[in-house]
Image (cartoon, rainbow, N blue to C red):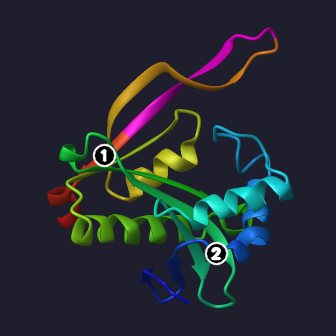
Amino acid sequence: MGFIIQSEKLGLRRFLESDCGDLFEYLSVPEVVRFEPYGPLTYNQCVNEVRGRAGSSNYWAVELKDGGKVIGNIFFKQREPLRHMTWELGYIFNRDYWGRGFATESAYMVMSYGFKHMGAHRIIATCNQLNERSWRLMERLGMRRELTAKQDSFFRHTIDGRPDWFDSYQYAILAEEFRR
């Protein structure tokens, strides 16, 4: 099915427009998108979203090889300036598949691919401090917390129109650390 990377259970590939139903299944759930810069998406918004992802090399659909269902996605993009060879990692998964190791396995596969085949020197990931599932995943991947930023970001506004700031963590790993 055009997998770029695969394991025994998972295949990672570019998005297809036919993935819209699976994408909607998880991006429409408030709990899943709680820490994302957008709220739950409608089906029509997912139609547009999957078209954008299908045309982008930054998004990797995570597909169960047994059944062909897309259960989540990995975001992997080279950051500017390019001379730093730093890549940013992100992930979001269908709630029905949480706690089974799929996010860890697929993120590890993308990191390994990035270091071996894409020339990555360093991979970073950030998350809201309250998103314990995310920062624990980063730690399972061998990443180290290197930054705690106070009120550095906001995605939403309060009822009175002020930014709803949050604290975030940044994790990172170097190629030589990953190889160990």
Tell me: residue 120, above or below residue 65. above
Q: x, y percentage for residue 94?
A: 70, 63
Number of numbered discs overlaid on the protein picture: 2
Q: Magenta part mainly helix, strand or loop? A: strand
Q: x, y percentage for residue 31?
A: 75, 47
- Residue at image mark 2: 16
The earlier-in-sequence mark between 1 and 2 is 2
Callout 2 secondary element: loop
Residue 51 is labelled as none
Single out the mark in the foreground, 1 or 2.
2
Query: What type is the residue that disc 2 sits on?
Result: Leu
Spatial CA distance of label 1 from label 2 is 30 Å
* Left or right side of 53 for 160: right
- Marks 1,2: beta carbons within 8 A: no
* Left or right side of 55 for 98: right
Tell me: residue 127, above or below residue 179. above
Callout 1 secondary element: strand
* Residue at x-position 69% and y-position 56%: 49
* Residue at x-position 82% and y-position 14%: 159
Q: How crowded is mark 1: few (under 14 residues within 10 Å), some or many (20 or more)?
A: many
* Left or right side of 125 for 134: right
- Residue at image mark 1: 172
Q: What stretch is highlighted in magenta?
A: 160-170
